[in-house]
Image: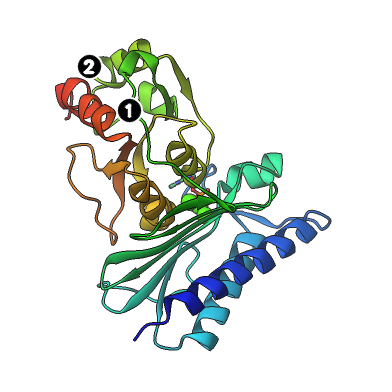
Amino acid sequence: MTNWTEIDQCARAWLKEAGDKIILSFQTALQIKEKTNANDLVTNIDQETERFFAKQIRQTFPGHRIMGEEGFGDDLKDLSGVVWIVDPIDGTTNFIHQKRNFMISIGIFENGESRLGYIYDVVLNEIYVAVAGEGAYWNDEQLPMLKETTVDKAVIGINLTWLTSNRLLDPAKTLIPLANDVRGTRSYGSAAMEFAYVSTGRLDAYITMRLSPWDFAGGKIILEEVGGKITNLKGEPLNLLEKTPVVAAKPRLHEKIIEEYLKKGIQ
Ligand code: 2AM
Ligand code: CA
Ligand code: CA
Ligand code: CA
């Protein structure tokens, strides 16, 4: 039998320890490297943080497997067993430029099913946690189920670069009309933060064209626990082993965004 209480306690303790190390790192020089392009960055702290989680998980739970952005995990071809999907720093550009608005994100799955989700805002020392089937929490406060809203009253998270060029959607038929019809748009630069915001109702929806499993794994578990919906552009379930566009929102708003906006210009 998998001891989920022990796993949860370990995850929380490691998040705190990793967060403390990240805060200490503010006093030393960052080593910044480019990955696929000049805007896709990684620092020594992203790498050290992921290495820390991989080491702790392997020591404590040798049977568990790890998927991580920075390559210290396992090369997963399936989701059998207990799998930790870890983004050591989500919002690396914010981490480098702002020293805030970045998160540690973890989703833990068993045979592909959601079990535990974490988004840790290191600088604010705020943690979003979900135990699948038992509710989601912001620190010690239980998060209420999401209340519906209409498009005209919605504040949505979206990066404006998706409105200027987009291979998946024709912006003129989809995202531009949506941006015009909603009350406001926001762009925070951390997918995990946007999922935390949709989960708490600070945002009504979040739309993005390309995330990896570690960007959404923790957020998906938390958001679904408060009744939110998270799918690809066509409303299909997300694949935890692939890159994917993501629409996350209150359920009726989610349906409206897909049916009345996105489906008008999928290309
Ligand atoms: P990251 O900071 O962990 O890379 C905004 O950049 C959001 O999109 C962040 O959550 C970021 O995660 C994610 N993202 C996914 N793929 C990206 C890429 N190729 N370049 C920059 N950000 C990416
Ligand atoms: Ca990255
Ligand atoms: Ca990320
Ligand atoms: Ca990252």
Rendered image quadrant of residue 177 = top left
- Disc 1 or disc 2, which is closer to the eye? 1
Seen in the image, is 42 located left or right of residue 256? right
Residue 173 position in % (x across, y down): 22, 16
Seen in the image, is 71 located left or right of residue 168? right
Query: For the residue marked with disc 1, what is the amino acid?
Result: Glu
Of label 1 and label 2, which has the lower sequence position? Answer: 1
Residue at x-position 29% and y-position 59%: 240
Relative to residue 267, is residue 116 depicted above or below?
A: below
Q: Are marks 1 and 2 in contact (CB under 8 Å)?
A: no
Residue at x-position 55% and y-position 73%: 9
Label 1 crowd bin: few (<14), some (14–19), many (20+), radius 10 Å = some
Q: What's the mark number on residue 173?
A: 2
Question: Which quadrant is home to the C terminus?
Answer: top left
Residue 230 position in % (x across, y down): 29, 44
Rendered image quadrant of residue 98 = top right
Question: Which quadrant is home to the N terminus?
Answer: bottom left
Residue at x-position 38% and y-position 21%: 164
**Element carrying mark 2:** helix
Residue at x-position 47% and y-position 85%: 61
State the residue in front, 153 or 62. 153
Seen in the image, is 58 located left or right of residue 83? right
Residue 57 position in % (x across, y down): 51, 79
Q: Which residue carries the number 1 mark? A: 148
Label 2 crowd bin: few (<14), some (14–19), many (20+), radius 10 Å = some
